[in-house]
Amino acid sequence: MEFARLLLAYEVASGKPADREAPAAFRVCEKLRAPLGRLMGFDGFRSLLSRALVLACAQLPVLCTLQIKANGSLGGLGELEAKLEARAIVEGEVVLVGQLLGLLVIFIGPGLTLRLLHEIWPEWKIEDFWQ
Amino acid sequence: MRKRKTPAQKPSKKALPPEKVKIRQLPTGVRGLDEITGGGLPEFSFNIIAGAPGCGKTTLAHQIIFANATAQKPALYFTVLGEPTLKMLRYQQQYSFFDPEKLGKAIRFINLSHIVMENDLGGVLAEITREVETANPGMVVVDSFRTVIRKAKGEESDMALQGFVQRLALLLTSWEATTFLIGEYSEQDIRDNPVFTVADGLLLLSQSIERNSVVRKLQLVKIRGQDSVPGLHTVRINGDGLQAFSRTLGFVGKKSKPARPRRLSVGIPELDKMMGGGILEGDSMLVAGPSGTGKSALATQFLAAGLRNGEPAIAAIFEERPDGYAARASAFGLDLETPQKNGKLELLYLRPLDLSVDESMQEILDAVKRTGAKRLVIDSLVGFEMALAPGFREDFRESLYRMIAALTGAGVTIFTAVEIEDTFTALQFSHYTISFLTDDIIRLRYVEIDGQLRKVLVVIKMRGGNHSKDIREYVITDEGVVVIGPRQTDYVRLTTGLPERIGQLKEKAPEPKAKE
């Protein structure tokens, strides 16, 4: 979870102003969607994100208002924002992204997960976290 | 003064014909496979890796791409409705050849499932073309290609299918990519299939269950423009991925035995004399006899004689552990411990389950190369055969022949012990009918003489020259096998084991008899 928190913080800090309208978790998931969809197919990515959402909902039930669209993107942001304060939304994002990264680590291990993230966020000093 | 030649007078240089194209061969990354393919895979070739599920097709493709892909010439690995990529990566990273550094830049996985599901063959080709033109790959893998074909077959004619395969081959060859299409094809599918007509290379993997063992094989059904090793080759999948064991055991084109071979001591001076001065270097000697006649003692003496002479040695032992083997040699005053520590001797104890004959032969060959061995002991053939998986025993004699031929061809002198039952009607040499592949045969046997079970030996055959025809009695003492006395002339029919005394010689028994 700490790793997800750092990734989200980096995404918030590094995102362009135009990006900042969508929550960081949406942006992270969206950035993961293209390379992971290419790697495992968009159905594969959708399945993985669905599983991450189910696990996240078990931790934070309010996240159940989110949906996963057919193309693997996240929906239901408006409903979530209406229900939660900004701080709670950030916590929800950490939980969801944490579950998604956790699944990747379970399947392909920390090494390959790290490599994948490094390709998407090449400037982010991920190694510092692992060390 | 010498006259300068005018251009017309100069001997005209004969115009050389234009050079033939040189096909670069790519390493497969699979131990033994480069030799089977005749040097590696032809660059820009269009290949099929076929076989039933579980044969190792995907692992083979991974080994090939990990051995060749670079960031400048990456490998594109298209996955289609087969094993989910995450799971593929999960499992494949367990192999030692899997280098995570290569993922992303040198090796790129691209899932084509949605393209295949939503498009016809033209759409699939367009997507592959787009990716290939973008990445400029050196290698392309489609896993599983049969899925692409299966989807298409329901909708498109055979002609369209053939056209697709043809266009794909043209595209990938033009883009200078070496291609591998992976498919769950069996031998039956290969006939009349347009894919196989277009392919330059076809690697067929198979596995069969024989009794309790799984036997994996690889066949290079087709490879254009190369002198490959035909036939079925044993394959093992372990932590290093696939390993192939060529039927030639890696000895193609190796140096031949010395033109003027030396006579080497077998460690028993009297036996050396019987053999015409010792065993010829590079010979294969079979020592046959029943249990307890001293075959292993003779083998250790043969090893020790070589070691004393500065010749490294290998003993492949199957019936005794190395420490026990060395301890027994020590009882004869032979030190096998020190040369083991010095790297001059290796005692190989080969007893894993499901051992394939080619694998065990490879172990021996590796040890021979490692130590530079000049002498090899196989103790014994019966134990060797018993260590093999049942499915491989049928190939035993053939493989043994290949190994002995390969090693003796390289100048290694081989001592093979074989246990046989003594019959009292015939003088058997071996139940393996391998006598033809040995240069020299020594037969040990029991005989009943004067109320004692005594031992005699005879040199049956020496391919390289004359030898003593005497039947000599011997004993095993704390110095090992010791050949004693002159030939027994007091008896006839010694070879039957039940000799008849014809002389009146009052000889003293070589070992004390019990007192009456």
Image (cartoon, coloured by chain):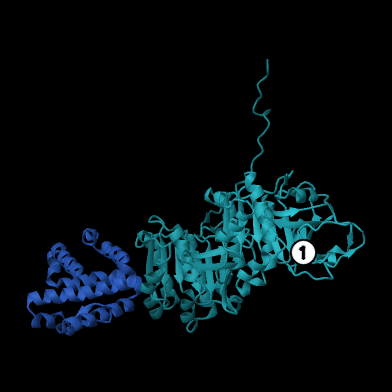
Chain colours: A blue, B cyan
* Whole-percent x, y for residue B325 in the image: 60, 59
Residue situated furthest top in the rendering: B1
In the rendered image, the vertical position of residue B297 relative to residue B203, given as above or below? above
Secondary structure state at the residue bearing disc 1: loop
Q: Which quadrant: the N terminus of chain B?
A: top right
Q: Is residue B195 visible?
A: yes
Residue situated furthest front in the rendering: B516
Disc tally is: 1
Residue closest to the eye, B421 or B85: B421
* Whole-percent x, y for residue B85 in the image: 38, 73
Q: Which quadrant: the C terminus of chain B?
A: bottom right
Q: Mark 1 falls within which chain?
A: B
Residue closest to the eye, B124 or B331: B331
Q: Quadrant of residue B470?
A: bottom right
Residue situated furthest left in the rendering: A85
* Whole-percent x, y for residue B457 in the image: 79, 58
Q: Quadrant of residue A106?
A: bottom left
* Whole-percent x, y for residue B188 in the image: 60, 79
Q: Residue at x 61, y 60 (%)?
A: B316
Tell whether B143 sits left or right of B278: left
Q: Quadrant of residue A116?
A: bottom left
Residue closest to the eye, B343 or B373: B343
Q: Residue at x 63, y 58 (%)?
A: B227
Q: Residues within 10 Å of mark 1 (few under 14, many from 20)?
A: few
User: Label 1 belongs to which residue?
Assistant: B515
Three-letter amino acid code of the residue under disc 1: Lys
Q: Residue at x 52, y 81 (%)?
A: B157
Q: Is residue B37 visible?
A: no
Tell whether A131 sits left or right of B138: left
